[in-house]
Amino acid sequence: MSKLLSLFSRSSRRRWLYSLMAAIMAVSIVVITPTPSQAVPRWLNILLQGVQIIQLSNLSDRQEAQLGQQINAQLTSRQFRLYRNSDVVRYIDDIGQRLAETSERSNIDYTFQVVDSDQINAFATMGGYVYVTTGLLRAAENEAEVAGVLGHEVGHIVERHAVEQMRERAVQAGVATAAGLDRNAAVAIGVDLALNRPNSRRDEYEADELGLRNMLEAGYAPSGLVTFMQKLAQRGSPPTFLSTHPHPADRVERLQQAISSLPSNVSSAATDGLAQDAYRARISPLLR
């Protein structure tokens, strides 16, 4: 081996190293990390560890979950405070997990959290992280309405809207390269997207449709999503949860049409979550 190595001149080694670095940067993998079993030279291992490039077009579920975890850590430590009553938090997580199991992307882990805020809001970020505020929980009249909101947010995750938005934002900001996006920049963009919720008309309609379908699969009364949207749309200024693009009234009309077109055996089978007293009892710590 030493004889073979001696055949390489200093310049040829340099060319070989530059070619290797270029190849590494062009690989379509989110984060390049060598496995422990590989016999990697120490200098190459250091080089690989320094390459924290994300290729969003080939983002795997595992890599999306890693990004989502980092975004969630930033959100929950710096941007808002989580509500900590274990009974209420567990109850909301139970609703969310019931929806996650019947969603079109049930293969990933979901985390449902309650944000301590009087604002009526709900949002999601990549990797299965969903947030709902205490203000929204107080405004809801029953479990089906909460399920409608959570189902809508799960719909955003199913369609990977946050990933698409991150890619668009990175290109617009000029921080994406041919190799991909720096991980730190990706986390910063993900935090901003979660807080500002710039979903398009198409994204909102898709999330509404998937949320409605998800509710039916989980056995929740589909009217819950409609009644909650109707109630909030009638307020003077609709909350962030109801994006003004498209208009809430248009979204309500589309949902009503979708429900009315359901076969009677489907709509009659999904009736859970309409008991107001039972819901109020479960969130009673919020009502004191």
Image: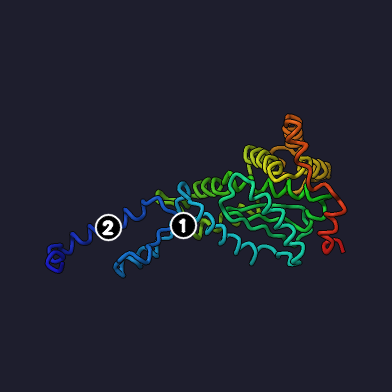
* 90 shown above or below 169: below
> Residue at image x 56%, y 53%?
108
Viewer-proximal residue among 212 and 161: 212
Decide if residue 32 is on the left or right side of residue 237: left
Q: Quadrant of the N terminus?
A: bottom left
Label 2 secondary element: helix
Q: Residues within 10 Å of mark 1 (few under 14, many from 20)?
A: some
* Residue 288 in the figure: left or right of residue 209: right
Q: Residue 182 carries which label?
A: 1
Please tell me in which quadrant of the rendered image residue 228 appears: top right
Q: Can residue 250 be seen in this view?
A: no
Residue at 71% in and 44% down: 215
The quadrant the C terminus occupies is bottom right
Q: Are marks 1 and 2 in contact (CB under 8 Å)?
A: no
Q: Is residue 279 above or below residue 168?
A: below
Q: What element carries label 1?
A: strand
Task: Using the numbered discs, state the Cα–Cα distance from disc 1 to disc 2 in whole angstroms.
Answer: 20 Å
The total of numbered circles placed on residues is 2
Res 170 seen here: yes
Dividing the picture into quarters, in which one does residue 110 lie? bottom right
Q: Where is residue 97 in the image (x, y as percent from the top left)?
A: 67, 54
Where residue 86 appears, as percent x and y from the top left, is 74, 66
- Identify the residue shown where x is 63% and y is 53%: 194
Which of the pair 109/185 is nearer the observer? Answer: 109
Q: Which residue is drawn at 18% across and 59% down?
A: 12
**Residue 139 spot, x, y in % from top left:** 82, 52
Say which amino acid is labelled 2: Tyr
Please tell me how crowded label 2 is: few (under 14), some (14-19), or many (20+) other residues with Cα within 10 Å: few
Rendered image coloring scheme = rainbow
- Where in the figure is residue 220, as x and y percent of width and height? 75, 45
The first of marks 1 and 2 along the sequence is 2
Q: Name the residue under label 2.
A: 18
